[in-house]
Amino acid sequence: MAVKVRIPTPLRKLTNEQDLVEVQAATITEAIKELQIKFPGIQERLVDEKGEVRRFVNIYVNEEDIRFLQNQHTPLKDADEISIIPAIAGG
């Protein structure tokens, strides 16, 4: 299914400055793999060596945090929108 992925500014250099890309995926894991195929290098910025979403990366599906859904196993349907939000630290 076709889903849209909002790319944050720090990762746009990997997507040729595109802020919105489309992937065919049924889960968040598949979406990340598809992003990696289209934009090599993006996966390592999103997930660790175990395949878990990095703790400083927040991923939302239709504005719902995947941590409160099924994490990377969160199912996707046509026209869903994924937002990748890097955590911002400050003091």
Image (tube, helix red, strand yellow):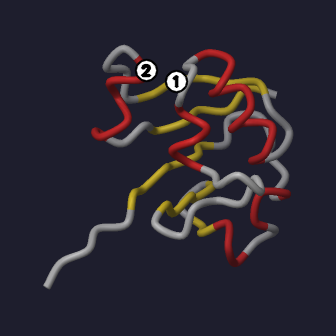
- Tell me the residue at 46%/66% (across/down): 56
- Tell me the residue at 63%/51% (across/down): 47
- The quarter of the displayed image where residue 15 is located: top left
- Tell me the residue at 67%/66% (across/down): 66
Can you give x and y, in whole percent of width and height, for residue 7 in the image? 42, 37
Position of 67 relative to 80 (above/below): below
* 85 left or right, relative to 65: left
Can you give x and y, in whole percent of width and height, for residue 71 in the image? 75, 65
Secondary structure at badge 1 equals strand
| Residue sitting nearer the eye, 22 or 13 | 13
| Residue sitting nearer the eye, 59 or 81 | 59
Q: As drawn, which residue projects farthest toward the front? A: 49
Can you give x and y, in whole percent of width and height, for residue 22 in the image? 60, 23
Residue 4 is marked as none
Task: Give the mark nearer the N terminus: 1 vs 2.
Answer: 2
Q: Are marks 1 and 2 in contact (CB under 8 Å)?
A: yes
Q: Please identify the quadrant where the N terminus is shown.
A: top right
- Tell me the residue at 78%/45% (across/down): 29
Give me the C-alpha separation between circle 1 and circle 2.
Answer: 8 Å
- The residue type indicated by label 2 comes to Thr
* 21 left or right, relative to 89: right
Can you give x and y, in whole percent of width and height, for residue 86 in the image? 39, 58
- The quarter of the displayed image where residue 44 is located: top right
* 58 left or right, relative to 9: right
Position of 21 relative to 54 (above/below): above
Position of 72 relative to 30 (above/below): below
Residue 15 is marked as 2
* Residue holding disc 1: 21
